[in-house]
Image (cartoon, rainbow, N blue to C red):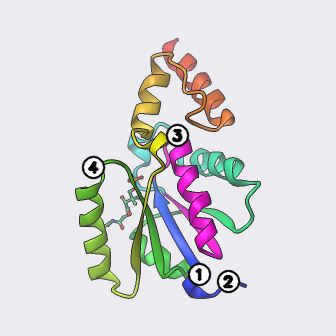
Amino acid sequence: MASTASVALYPGSFDPVHNGHLDIIVRARHMFGRVVVGVVTNLDKHALFPVDDRVAMLRAATRAHPGIEVRCFDGLTVEFARRVGARVIVKGLRAMMDFEYELKMAAMNKRLRPEIETVFMMTSPEFAYLSSTLIREVSAFGGSVAGLVPPSVARRLGRTARLQAR
Ligand code: PNS
């Protein structure tokens, strides 16, 4: 059983999961005994994929990795962190664009639950400009996202784009 300090929560919307997310998840797992990937439910009305599908895509993409658990949550991230026994919230930082937004969230989370630390990991350079928003846009216009998302997610995006084009 992993100790409390070695449990990390990686929260996000994952709409859909891409290879930049997976890079952070796997690298976080090298540092923590257990990584809980928390898929936020409360953006559902704006999401391309319902939360159950986002969770299923993440579970399929992380199945080969022990110590990684995918769960959905609503409400505050820090409260979910407490529920799963995580003292650390892991966030990925890409180039400059994430910094201000992430700093604000980390400061607010610290204020809400001072005992929970936010740890930032730099996204690997090959994924520095990757985002779920770009993936959705490229796919919606028929572009290839192969190599940027797991193959099952690419297939799923292709099906969704074809349905929307009808
Ligand atoms: O993948 P995203 O969209 O960058 O993830 C943002 C997420 C889900 C981590 C953030 O919106 C969040 O923590 N939402 C849960 C509600 C909450 O705790 N809000 C206060 C954050 S300071």
In this rendered view, identify the residue nearer to me: 74 or 144.
144
Tag of residue 6: 1
* Whole-percent x, y for residue 65 in the image: 73, 59
Callout 2: helix, strand or loop? loop
Task: Name which residue type carries label 2.
Answer: Ala
Q: Which residue is mark 4?
A: 96
Q: Is residue 82 magenta?
A: no
Q: Which residue is mark 2?
A: 2
Task: Name which residue type carries label 4.
Answer: Met
Do the numbered discs 1 and 2 sit on residues whose CB atoms are within 8 Å?
yes
Q: Say which of marks 1 and 3 sits in front.
A: 1
Q: Which residues are magenta?
A: 13-39
Cα gap from disc 3 to disc 2, whole angstroms = 32 Å
Q: Which residue is mark 3?
A: 49
* Whole-percent x, y for residue 82 in the image: 49, 82
Callout 4: helix, strand or loop? loop
First-in-chain label (3 vs 2): 2
First-in-chain label (2 vs 4): 2
Q: Residues within 10 Å of mark 4 (few under 14, many from 20)?
A: few
Q: Quadrant of the N terminus?
A: bottom right
Quarter of the image where one finds residue 84: bottom right
* Whole-percent x, y for residue 105 in the image: 29, 66
Residue drawn at point x = 47 percent, y = 56 percent:
41
Cα gap from disc 3 to disc 4, whole angstroms = 27 Å
Do the numbered discs 3 and 2 sit on residues whose CB atoms are within 8 Å?
no
Judged from the image, the quadrant occupied by ligand 1 is bottom left
User: Taking 65 as reference, is 137 left or right?
Assistant: left
Callout 3: helix, strand or loop? loop
Q: Residues within 10 Å of mark 2 (few under 14, many from 20)?
A: few
Q: Residues within 10 Å of mark 1 (few under 14, many from 20)?
A: some
Whether residue 17 is visible here, answered yes or no, is no
Q: Say which of marks 4 and 1 sits in front.
A: 4
